Amino acid sequence: MRTQRLRFGAVAVLAVFGLALAGCGVGTENPSAPNATAPTTETDWEVAGSMTADGPNGPRQGVPDAPLEAVNGDGGKYDKLALNSLADLQEFWTAVYPEHFPGRFTPVTTFYSWDARAPRQQAIQFCGEHTYHVVNAAYCSLDHTIGWDRGVLLPQVVAKFGEMAVVMVLAHEYGHAIQGQAKIAGMRTPTIVLEQQADCLAGVFLRHVAEGDSAHFTLNTTDGLNAVLAATVAIRDQDPSDPQNAHGSAFERVTAVQIGYADGAQGCKKITPTDIAERRGTLPVSFLPGEEFAQLPVDAESLTMVGRALLEIFPTSRPPRFDYSGVVRNCPNVTATQPVSYCPNSNTIGADVPGLARRAGQMWGEVEPLSAAVDGDYNAFIVFVSRYVLAVQQDRKLSVTGPDTAGLRTACLSGVVTTELSEPDSNPRLSAGDLDEAVSGLLTDGLAASDVNGETVPSGYQRLEAFRTGVLNGEQACSARYR
């Protein structure tokens, strides 16, 4: 029997984050190690300072703009937003760099701004390149400068994800400026390592902002941090099989940001080719021949196949009944979740198959640039998986209610299943990008991280952290963390 694969829908995004114009070495890793590392689970996501779940988010009101200027800048709101971000980054890294890295820290002091819509004669040179129609933000290692497009890129980022996403963009570029000085990367360092280190260092700064210590910005840990992570999801490799795309999937980029956010600069120093290979394990990171547009149809036949795989991965003393005629109605003391529900009383998983198929989205074709929505079959199947692992928890006499216990444990165990479905002999087997589909859903509605009533924690960070814990660290980590 030919192994069928759950396949990620094609994406088309602007490759705007993390391009070091001076050039980066591109290498490949051997993803053979089965064990993985993740952010330290002992470091709570919400700690000291003024970090709040529902507090203010964005530029601080009444704070004077930073006294920085950009070459070719126009003094407009996007240049001010960028320069205020860079002023806070400069202050932060000047203070903390000596605590973590050797040598003397040299801040970035020269900045370039351009408008990608401007005529050719108004374009400037940045990092030895012409900026005519260049929609990008980048660090230039040739002369230790940072530049950005104020005409297209920054307005689109703000429109899609808010002003704090611009802070993320510049924090990532500043991360590139840190790497060489800190000697955690060099000319031979693979691009995937350079990019994940920069994402990680951006996460370190975001934690500083969330704790209330940034002069110009605040960041709450619900909609604020969710939007920043969504921007990270939006900028992912379009085709992981393309050797030109070595910047990491959405799953990997979010993981890197969260390593920095949770573990600080010390965690970023540990991001190496070996570390990335260990985290990848058997997870698919490139397409096999014919997989580019192959999707597993979201229908009763496919759900039956996934259901058989679930019964093997997590057997129970009393297997649940699968009903593909719709969600379970009249389940005592339970609010049915759409488009898949679990009823503990009857031990039944009910699926509205057409509704589940709609959740998968178009599954092929062009996707809007700078979109954090990743359509595809696994965006649907992960919700089906999550309702099954609720049945597993019920079978093990664990509570299936409570968003911060049962909900996060559900996300974590769904991550365990995801890793099992990536094994070479799994049928069906995941394909490159399927994890990104799961990440997208977890960050938006979070249904795969909800309890039996559909209740979920408001923090996409927590939901993703739980899922990633299961993917990388397995069932035992889920049991220990989400009691």
Image: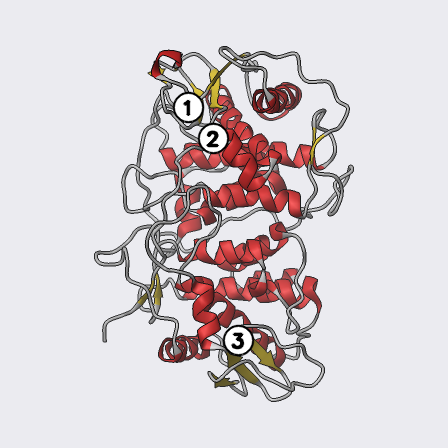
Q: Residues within 10 Å of mark 2 (few under 14, many from 20)?
A: many
Amino acid type at image mark 2: Leu
The spot of residue 273 in percent (x, y) is: 39, 39
Single out the mark in the foreground, 3 or 1. 1
Q: CA distance from mark 3 to mark 1?
A: 49 Å
Tell me the tag on residue 153. Answer: 2
Is residue 418 visible to the viewer in this orientation of the structure? no
Name which quarter of the figure residue 455 lies in.
Answer: bottom right
The spot of residue 31 in percent (x, y) is: 35, 49
**Viewer-proximal residue among 366 and 192:** 366
Q: Is residue 273 above or below residue 104?
A: below
* Horizontal side, residue 216 vs residue 81: left or right: right
* Residue at (43, 69) in percent of width and height: 357
Identify the residue under disc 1. Answer: 116
* Horizontal side, residue 369 vs residue 386: left or right: left
Q: Are marks 2 and 1 in contact (CB under 8 Å)?
A: yes
**Residue most extreme to the front:** 119
Amino acid type at image mark 3: Tyr
Q: Quadrant of the C terminus?
A: bottom right
The spot of residue 10 in percent (x, y) is: 34, 52
**Viewer-proximal residue among 246 and 446:** 446
Tell me the element at label 2. helix
Q: Is residue 38 above or below residue 170?
A: below
* Residue at (50, 37) in percent of width and height: 270
Q: Is residue 357 above or below residue 56?
A: below
* Residue at (53, 55) in percent of width and height: 468
N-term-proximal mark, 2 vs 1? 1
Q: Residues within 10 Å of mark 1 (few under 14, many from 20)?
A: many
